[in-house]
Every structure is written in structure tokens, then in C-alpha cells.
Image (cartoon, helix red, strand yellow):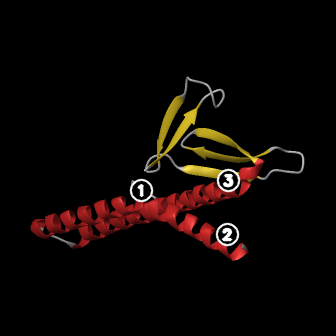
Amino acid sequence: MALIMLEGETVTTTRKLVERYEYKEDKIRHVKFESAGHVDRDCEIKFHIGSKGISIDIAKGEQTSAQGIYKVLELISRAQVANDRLWEVSTLGIKHASEALRLTENSDQTLAKQSDEATAWLYEAYKRTHPHCYRDVIQTAFSDLRLVDKMGQ
């Protein structure tokens, strides 16, 4: 899953630049929402994805939808941070386990089997902490927003 960004000078510009940012590789950081004031005609979402800073102006009438997008971006960012921490703990755990095994185990065959199991475990940890898709995070955020909207009516 990825964030697809379409850029042009204006909405009617025929020349557009399409950029793709993979959630697996490009981390979302510094998510901010600037609400529309009494004089402002728009609200704004600002964030960084990978090394690029992004600012999106949104019409004042769409502020509720913009808040939903802000929430989704913030939740993806938090999930990415949590996944990075899990990956760090996993790699540290395997490093310390391998050092302990090296000190206590003399059988090459057992070490080879343990090494294969540790590699498989680390690969599973990588897949868990570097997902291609944040669909569940996005769906949960939008479901929560729908519930809030229904409660407000």
C-alpha cells in the first residue's frame, strides 16, 4: 500500500507529477492539522513522508473530511513507529540469543538447526513489523470517524 501524490500548478493543469510513497519504506512523521479560522478559506494538513515535506490545502467546507485524513495519517505514523520499535527489539533479541548460544552450545548440527529457526523467526518478525499494507489501521480510523459522526447527529 502506498500514498499516491498528484501534483500540478492548478487543478486544471494538464501536466501533473505523480509520486508514490510506499508505507513500508517511507515513514510518515510530524503530522499536523491547521484548522480554518474565521478569515481563512482553507485548512491545512502538513506532514513528512520519507524525506519530503508535504502540505495540503483543503477547502474550509471539507474540514471534517480533512480531520479524518489527518487521523489516518497520524495512526499510520504511530503504527510505523511501533513497528520500528518491535523490529529493533527483535533484532536485539536475536543478537543476544545468538551470543548466548555461541557460548553454551558445542554441537554444530544443533546450532545449524537453531540458526535456521532463529532466521525464520527473524524473517517473520520483519514481515510483521514492515507490512506492505496498513489497511487495518486505515479502516479502523474511518470506522471510528463514522461512529463519531453518527453520535453527533
Could you tell me residue 114's position as x and y percent? 19, 68
Q: Residue at x 55, y 69 (%)?
A: 143
Q: Which residue is mark 1?
A: 133
Q: Which residue is mark 3?
A: 66
Say left or right for 145 vs 131. right
Which element is circle 3 on?
helix
Q: Amino acid at mark 1?
A: Cys
The 10 Å Cα crowd at callout 3, few under 14, some 14 to 19, many 20 or more, is: many
Q: Is residue 6 above or below residue 13?
A: below
Nearer to us of marks 1 and 3 is 3
Say left or right for 108 vs 125. left
Q: Is residue 30 above or below residue 122?
A: above
Distance in Å between CA atoms under marks 1 and 3: 22 Å
Q: Can residue 73 be spotted in the picture?
A: yes
Tell me the number on the disc at residue 149. 2
Q: Are marks 2 and 1 in contact (CB under 8 Å)?
A: no
Residues 109 and 58: in front is 58
Q: Residue at x 64, y 47 (%)?
A: 47
Nearer to us of marks 3 and 2 is 2
Mark sitting earlier along the chain (3/2)? 3
Which element is circle 2 on?
helix
Could you tell me residue 100's position as x and y percent? 30, 70
Please identify the quadrant where the C terminus is shown.
bottom right
Could you tell me residue 39's position as x and y percent? 89, 46
Mark sitting earlier along the chain (1/3)? 3
Q: Can residue 88 be spotted in the picture?
A: no
Distance in Å between CA atoms under marks 2 and 1: 26 Å
Q: Amino acid at mark 2?
A: Asp
The 10 Å Cα crowd at callout 1, few under 14, some 14 to 19, many 20 or more, is: few
Nearer to us of marks 2 and 1 is 2
